[in-house]
Image: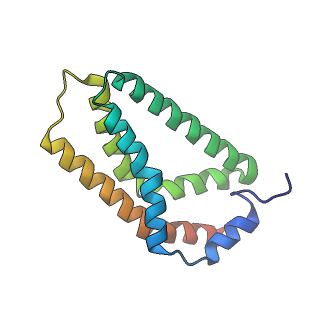
């Protein structure tokens, strides 16, 4: 209980002063963002695609709820704002990519996967990774320095 959590003043102060190793952070982001997407994509071509889409949405909702609740419990409204700041701008790209994949999972076989979907999803996921890698840490550090 005494160990500092992710929303503790100690951790947040450490984050403001840390220099991020881009190559190491990229591999972390690939595991965190691309692996679930690839798992969902693989399941989208099976009979359990609808169940996978529903379970993914439940998992995302529960995870987001726990994160926001923990942030609000530790930092109040500043914690909620920190969570929103931490998701911006990369989630403007991730959300459309996942919506296309989830929509396909839920509506297949009536809806077919095509080249336009592949290009759109690849482009939006790539832009999400790039913005999370280079832009988001700067935004979060600026936000944390104002706390």
Q: Residue at x 45, y 54 (%)?
A: 31
Residue that sits furthest to the right in the current view = 2
Quarter location, residue 98: top left
Coordinates of residue 141 in the picture (x, y in percent): 57, 71
Give whichever of 12, 40 is nearer the camera. 40
Q: Residue at x 71, y 50 (%)?
A: 76
Q: Residue at x 40, y 56 (%)?
A: 90
Asked if residue 64 is positioned above or below residue 75 in the image, the reply reads above
For this view, does 32 lie left or right of residue 63? left
What is the basis of the colouring in this image? rainbow
Coordinates of residue 147 in the picture (x, y in percent): 67, 67
Asked if residue 79 is positioned above or below residue 11 in the image, the reply reads above
Q: Residue at x 25, y 52 (%)?
A: 122
Give whichever of 51, 98 is nearer the camera. 51
Coordinates of residue 73 in the picture (x, y in percent): 74, 46
Number of callouts in the render? 0
């Amino acid at each position: 209980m005494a160990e500092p959590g992710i929303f503790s003043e100690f951790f947040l102060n450490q984050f403001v002063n840390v220099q991020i190793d881009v190559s190491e952070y990229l591999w972390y982001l690939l595991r965190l963002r691309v692996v679930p997407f690839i798992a969902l994509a693989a399941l989208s071509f099976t009979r359990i695609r609808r169940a996978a889409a529903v379970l993914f949405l439940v998992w995302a909702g529960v995870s987001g709820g726990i994160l926001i609740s923990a942030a609000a419990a530790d930092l109040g409204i500043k914690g909620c704002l920190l969570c929103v700041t931490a998701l911006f701008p990369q989630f403007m790209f991730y959300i459309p990519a996942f919506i296309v994949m989830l929509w396909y999972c839920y509506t297949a076989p009536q809806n077919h996967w095509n080249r336009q979907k592949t290009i759109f999803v690849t482009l939006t996921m790539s832009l999400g990774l790039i913005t999370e890698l280079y832009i988001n840490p700067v935004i979060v550090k600026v936000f944390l320095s104002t706390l």
